[in-house]
């Protein structure tokens, strides 16, 4: 089983991500912050399954998106991470890139826009 991890403190965003990506043949796994996402990632790995992509908000309680990217890159160098966030400042985007993010998309997004960017990273 392949998983796409949607990491956002807004359940509404996570649900719309899941809905938009329905047709792609991946299970969409929800995490509400960076720490929760690291735990979900480990659970997937422990089952011998794969996380194909992480879609990550920036502003979240407990562990924010940039911290998540830094921590995640310690344990997984290659799985693509797309930041999905209302943050659009060049400085923030650059900070994400430096941390190891692979792409950046500004919310709100249409289902078509999301499928387009996800399809670039996942097959
Ligand atoms: Mg947020």
Image (cartoon, rainbow, N blue to C red):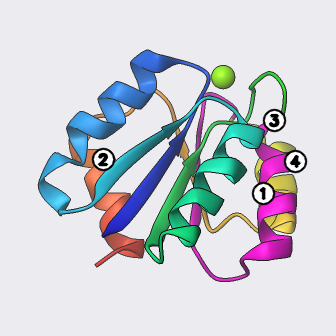
Residue corresponding to mark 4? 67
Pick whichever, 38 or 105, lies toward us.
38
Secondary structure beneath label 2: helix
Q: Nearer the viewer, residue 103 or 12?
A: 12
Quickly name the residue at label 2: 113
Q: Quadrant of the C terminus?
A: bottom left
Residue 19 numbered mark, or none: none
Residue furthest bottom in the image? 78
**Disc 3/disc 2 C-alpha distance (Å):** 24 Å
In screen coordinates, is 20 left or right of 103? left
Contact (Cβ within 8 Å) of mark 2 with mark 4: no
Residue tagged 1:
69
**Residue 112 within the magenta-colored segment of the rendering:** no
Asked if residue 46 is positioned above or below residue 85 in the image, the reply reads below
Q: Secondary structure at mark 3?
A: loop
Magenta stretch encompasses residue 72 = yes
Question: Badge 4, how many Cα within 10 Å: few under 14, some, many 20+?
Answer: some
Disc 1 crowd rating (10 Å Cα; few below 14, some 14-19, many 20+) is many
Asked if residue 74 can be seen in this view, the reply is yes
Contact between labelled residues 4 and 1, with CB atoms less than 8 Å apart: yes
Q: Identify the mark nearer the N-term, 3 or 2.
A: 3
Q: Residue placed at 56% from the left, 71% from the top?
A: 45
* Chain-order first, disc 3 or disc 1: 3
- Label 3 vs label 1: CA separation? 9 Å
The residue where tag 3 is placed is 64
Up-down: is 6 above or below 76?
above
Q: Position of residue 78 (x, y in %)?
A: 64, 82
């Amino acid at each position: 089983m392949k998983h796409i991890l949607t990491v956002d403190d807004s359940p509404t965003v996570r649900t719309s991500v899941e809905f938009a990506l329905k047709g792609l043949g991946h299970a969409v796994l929800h995490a509400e912050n960076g720490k929760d996402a690291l735990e979900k990632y480990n659970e997937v790995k422990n089952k011998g399954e794969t996380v194909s992509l992480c879609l990550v908000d920036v502003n979240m309680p407990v562990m924010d998106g940039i911290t998540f990217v830094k921590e995640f890159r310690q344990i997984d160098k290659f799985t693509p991470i797309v930041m999905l966030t209302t943050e659009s400042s060049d400085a923030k985007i650059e900070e994400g890139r430096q941390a190891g993010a692979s792409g950046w998309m500004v919310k709100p997004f249409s289902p078509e826009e999301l499928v387009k960017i996800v399809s670039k990273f996942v097959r």
